[in-house]
């Protein structure tokens, strides 16, 4: 945990909130400064990324009366909720399910789809051992399942919805070695993508769920573990990440931000900033596939998203 709540980096003020509130120099409504926020318990990992985007926006928002863009990091979604309600954060990026929490209580609204790490959408895959004889979700009754953790979108929320849609009754097992209740699918949390793969490979779980991106990543799904596994189900894709705006942020200013973000990938300077800012490939408007991906996430969130709060 950082002991200093306030740091000066370059020409920008960085406010890192870890428990106590320190008000940043802002006031989007006054036409002076904006605040770009982030949720993280490890702020030191994100400051440079945020400053790169803040600098880029500040230059291009000067003609809209903005004199600078500050950076603020909150340690939890709950703290970010408070900051948005207080008008102390104007813009931030977040994954779809966390973003939907903010949309639900009207503290923030989505501006654009964010192609985080070059990906616009993702989905979950459910894997079993090749020699298990399991072929469909219905075959999982009476078996044991490995989720990643309670707050994981692709490792819990999306696959849980798929399992429930298939008519399976889920029962949590505090220990994966506990017996499964009659007629149910017992589940435990493996606490990591690679652990999900390892549990299934070694028979601690009969099936498990991770994202398709993690399945293709040798760091989270090593070939030595994957070689004995196969996919029996893939979920529908959902939107991966969003750029959000404080609900009360000026509409004209929001449109200017959208126009800036939409064209960033068209210039070398913009692409360099996007790459530094969480390896974003581009931003696009919430239309067509993007709108459908957000609605798919919203449908799942309504059913199981509250369980991750």
Image: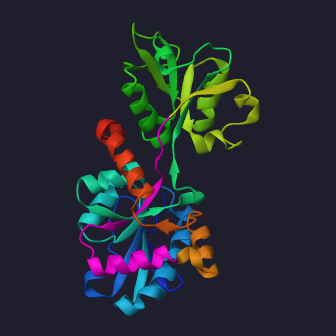
Count of numbered circles on the image? 0
Query: Range of the magenta residues?
Result: 235-263
Spot occupied by residue 66 in the image (x, y as percentages of width and height): 37, 88
Taking the magenta stretch, the answer to whether it contains residue 44 is no
Spot occupied by residue 207 in the image (x, y as percentages of width and height): 56, 22
Q: Is residue 244 left or right of residue 10?
A: left
The residue that appears at 48% across and 21% down in the rendered structure is 137
Q: In this view, does 12 lie above or below 223?
A: below
The residue lying furthest to the right in this view is: 224
The residue that appears at 58% across and 77% down in the rendered structure is 266
* Quarter placement of the C terminus: top left
Which residue occupies the foreground of this view, 145 or 141?
141
Asked whether the viewer can see residue 309, the reply is: no
Quadrant of residue 267 in the image? Answer: bottom right
Taking the magenta stretch, the answer to whether it contains residue 240 is yes
The residue that appears at 38% across and 48% down in the rendered structure is 97
Asked whether the viewer can see residue 239, the reply is: yes
Spot occupied by residue 203 in the image (x, y as percentages of width and height): 63, 17
The residue that appears at 29% across and 62% down in the rendered structure is 108
Q: Is residue 113 above or below residue 298?
A: below
């Amino acid at each position: 945990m950082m002991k200093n709540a306030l740091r000066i980096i370059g020409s920008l003020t960085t406010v890192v909130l870890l428990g106590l509130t320190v008000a940043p120099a802002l006031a989007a409504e006054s036409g002076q400064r904006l605040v770009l926020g982030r949720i993280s318990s490890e702020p030191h990992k994100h400051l440079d990324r945020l400053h790169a985007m803040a600098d880029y926006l500040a230059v291009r928002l000067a003609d809209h009366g903005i004199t600078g863009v500050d950076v603020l990091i909150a340690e939890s979604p709950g703290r970010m909720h408070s900051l948005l309600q207080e008008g102390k954060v104007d813009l931030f990026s977040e994954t779809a399910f966390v973003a939907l929490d903010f949309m639900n209580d009207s503290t923030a609204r989505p501006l654009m789809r964010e192609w985080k790490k070059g990906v616009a959408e993702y989905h979950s895959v459910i894997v079993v051992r090749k020699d298990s004889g399991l072929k469909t979700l219905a075959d999982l009754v009476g078996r044991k399942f490995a989720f990643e953790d309670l707050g994981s979108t692709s490792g819990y929320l999306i696959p849980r919805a798929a399992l429930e849609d298939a008519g399976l009754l889920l029962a949590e097992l505090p220990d994966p070695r506990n017996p499964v209740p009659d007629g149910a699918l017992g589940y435990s949390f493996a606490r990591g993508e690679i652990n999900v793969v390892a549990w299934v490979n070694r028979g601690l779980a009969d099936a498990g769920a991770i994202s398709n991106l993690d399945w293709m990543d040798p760091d989270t799904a090593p070939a030595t573990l994957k070689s004995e596994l196969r996919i029996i189900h893939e979920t529908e894709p959902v939107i991966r990440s969003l750029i959000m705006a404080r609900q009360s942020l000026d509409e004209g200013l929001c449109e200017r931000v959208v126009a800036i973000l939409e064209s960033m990938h068209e210039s070398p300077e913009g692409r360099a900033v996007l790459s530094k800012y969480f390896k974003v490939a581009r931003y696009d408007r919430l239309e067509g596939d993007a709108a459908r991906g957000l609605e798919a996430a919203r449908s799942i969130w309504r059913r199981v998203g509250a369980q991750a709060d």
